[in-house]
Image (tube, coloured by chain):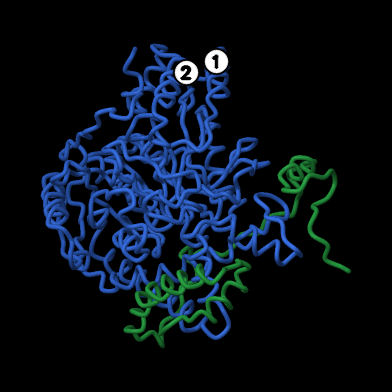
Chain colours: A green, B blue
């Protein structure tokens, strides 16, 4: 199988990672060698095998939905990349 | 006492408890040695002043009943530490200051330990050599220009160089055991669900586990006892009876059945590794263990499975880094452009590669062929171990297929880098505990490790086997302090 540049551009769009031509070519080479290696799995017949979704064989526990940390707004906002007081700021979305 | 930093954890604890040493003396010694060791590049963020203040405070009113009384330690920079920058080795988290503490580190501070700083690691723990870190590669104290392993490379280097008496790392495919093996130290990857993942920057949620790294097995057992707790903040944390691992540690492993899986004799494995393994079998026999040949038939499929499952989970986990609420942001013409530029400039090459692989295998039309297939093979790999454990109590293998390699040697070939984890990855896929102990040197004098894999929740057993074998092996690390200025 071969991953072409068109596919790389499609995945990069889905991944929200911009790539230029040069990077796309490098990625195509890398991904092709990695997928060659992954293709080994096709040697195995797995039709009747149950997929393993979690190794932790427990059912998820319920807990009460209580607020445990309070008044973190200032600390949380402080981490935002754009300086402001009360909100997260992003480029204009609605015209 | 000039040789404070040479003391292992248990010695330091004893000396603090008997008041031969104060926390301030110990902390000062490790801080001074760390300051002289900048060339190793193990620290991403130093917190020495706070550490010294905390040590002073501890000494004013020492609580000597704690398990880690006034012991200074640095931790991998994948653990969120409240009010101290946590980067995960990435540019995208360069300025991130958590508002909360990871459960594992909180458990450590609750037992009296003191944070000295945050240790370098591969970006988002994706790497086997610490070369993907935004903050530069780490030197292995064994030799200049040698990688310390990864992703917990700052951690392994710091313990081997005695800049911290113990530390914690995380292990998704070998990130504790492989660096431990490369630096002549001990590293334990606990059973999945043993240590809480709350507050650990997520890489692959069904595989990630935190674990202890130390100079010897006993210290490792003590730290494991501190960090392993049930935690309702992690929905996959498992509520089982945890031992006081260090107290119940014994060298009596007579009659324990240890399996030797023939599939781990991989093509092209250096003779040194084969010889080390044979020696390990003899050590185990000397300790009274019974050796049994076993088969783990799907071993060869573990790495390809891992390179679907781990990137798939990573691509989902790393979707949160969008430049909006925290972390690095690149300016863009519109919102989408901002996302795309932020992620393109904020993530390094290996992380981008894995996000792309993960996105591809989860994308419409490919999910069944890759992700579902990998989950099925993962089941077969787990079944192999389940079958083996009907016959044996533990499994002995080499930790890595080679000793530490040179910086830059494998960076251009992702697949050859991935092959480093061939012996460690199956353990994560099956959710089992595994420990790497130093067991010898290769011709260049570089350390080599052996791995003991246990049944789920059977950390005590593999710690005991490691403890017994450690005495027979009597490993000495050749460290010359070449980097000290």
x and y, in percent, of residue B64 in the image: 48, 20
**Is B91 on the left or on the right of B434, as rendered?**
right
Taking A35 as reference, is B57 left or right? right
Q: Is residue B460 above or below residue B316?
A: above
Residue B347 lies in what quarter of the image?
A: bottom right
The residue where tag 2 is placed is: B23
| CB under 8 Å between discs 2 and 1 | yes
Q: Earlier in the sequence, mark 2 or mark 1?
A: 2
Q: Which residue is mark 1?
A: B56
**Residue A61 numbered mark, or none:** none
Q: Secondary structure at mark 2?
A: helix
Residue B96 in the image, given as x and y percentages of width and height = 64, 44
Q: Nearer the viewer, residue B1 or A32?
A: A32
Q: Position of residue B110 (x, y in %)?
A: 55, 32
Instruction: State which chain disc 2 sits on.
Output: B
- In the rendered image, the quadrant that contains the N terminus of chain B is top left
Q: What's the CA distance linking mark 2 and mark 1?
A: 7 Å
- Residue located 41% across and 41% down the image: B154
Mark 1: few/some/many CA within 10 Å (<14, 14-19, 20+): some
């Amino acid at each position: 199988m071969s991953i072409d540049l068109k596919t790389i551009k499609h995945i990069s769009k889905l991944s929200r990672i911009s790539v230029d031509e040069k990077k796309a070519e490098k990625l195509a080479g890398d991904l092709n060698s990695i997928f060659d290696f992954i293709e080994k799995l096709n040697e195995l017949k797995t039709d009747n095998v149950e997929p393993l979704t979690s190794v932790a064989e427990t059912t998820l526990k319920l807990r009460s939905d209580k607020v445990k940390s309070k008044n973190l707004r200032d600390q949380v906002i402080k981490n935002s990349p754009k300086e402001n007081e009360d909100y997260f700021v992003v480029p204009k979305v609605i015209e | 006492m000039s040789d404070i930093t040479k003391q292992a954890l248990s010695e330091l604890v004893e000396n603090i408890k008997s008041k031969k040493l104060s926390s301030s003396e110990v902390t000062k010694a490790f801080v001074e040695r760390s300051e002289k060791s900048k060339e190793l590049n193990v620290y991403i963020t130093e917190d020495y002043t706070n550490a010294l203040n905390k040590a002073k405070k501890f000494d004013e009113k020492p609580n000597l009943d704690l398990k880690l009384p006034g012991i200074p330690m640095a931790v991998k920079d994948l653990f969120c530490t409240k009010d101290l920058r946590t980067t995960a080795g990435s540019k995208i988290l360069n300025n991130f200051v958590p508002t909360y503490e990871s459960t594992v580190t909180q458990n450590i501070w609750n037992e009296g330990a003191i944070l000295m700083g945050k240790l370098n690691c591969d970006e988002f723990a994706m790497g086997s050599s610490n070369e993907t870190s935004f903050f530069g590669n780490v030197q292995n104290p064994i030799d200049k220009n040698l990688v310390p392993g990864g992703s917990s490379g700052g951690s392994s280097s710091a313990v081997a160089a005695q800049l911290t008496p113990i530390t914690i790392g995380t292990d998704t495919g070998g990130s504790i055991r492989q660096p431990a093996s490369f630096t002549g130290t001990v590293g334990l990857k606990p059973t999945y669900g043993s240590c809480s993942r709350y507050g650990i920057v997520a890489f692959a949620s069904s595989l990630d586990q935190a674990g202890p790294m130390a100079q010897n097995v006993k210290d490792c057992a003590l730290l494991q006892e501190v960090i392993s707790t049930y935690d309702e903040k992690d929905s996959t944390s498992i509520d089982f009876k945890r031992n006081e691992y260090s107290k119940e540690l014994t060298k009596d492993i007579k009659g324990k059945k240890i399996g030797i899986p023939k599939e781990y004799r991989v093509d092209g494995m250096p003779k040194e590794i084969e010889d080390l393994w044979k020696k390990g079998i003899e050590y185990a026999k000397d300790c009274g263990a019974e050796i049994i040949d076993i088969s783990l038939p799907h071993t060869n499929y573990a790495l390809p499975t891992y390179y679907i499952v781990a990137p798939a989970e990573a691509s989902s986990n790393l979707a949160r880094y969008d430049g909006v609420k925290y972390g690095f942001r690149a300016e863009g013409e519109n919102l989408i452009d901002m996302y795309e530029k932020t992620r393109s400039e904020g993530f390094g090459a290996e992380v981008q590669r894995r996000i792309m692989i993960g996105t591809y295998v989860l994308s419409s039309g490919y999910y069944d062929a890759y992700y579902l297939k990998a989950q099925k093979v993962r089941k077969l790999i787990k079944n192999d171990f389940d079958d083996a454990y009907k016959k044996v109590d533990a499994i002995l293998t080499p930790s890595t297929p080679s000793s530490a390699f040179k910086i830059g040697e494998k960076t251009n070939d992702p697949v050859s880098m991935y092959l480093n984890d061939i012996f460690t990855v199956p353990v994560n896929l099956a959710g089992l505990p595994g420990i790497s102990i130093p067991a010898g040197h290769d011709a260049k004098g570089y350390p080599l490790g052996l791995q003991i894999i246990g049944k789920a929740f059977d950390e005590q057993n593999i710690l005991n086997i490691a403890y017994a074998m450690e005495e027979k092996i009597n490993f000495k690390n050749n460290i010359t302090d070449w980097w000290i200025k």
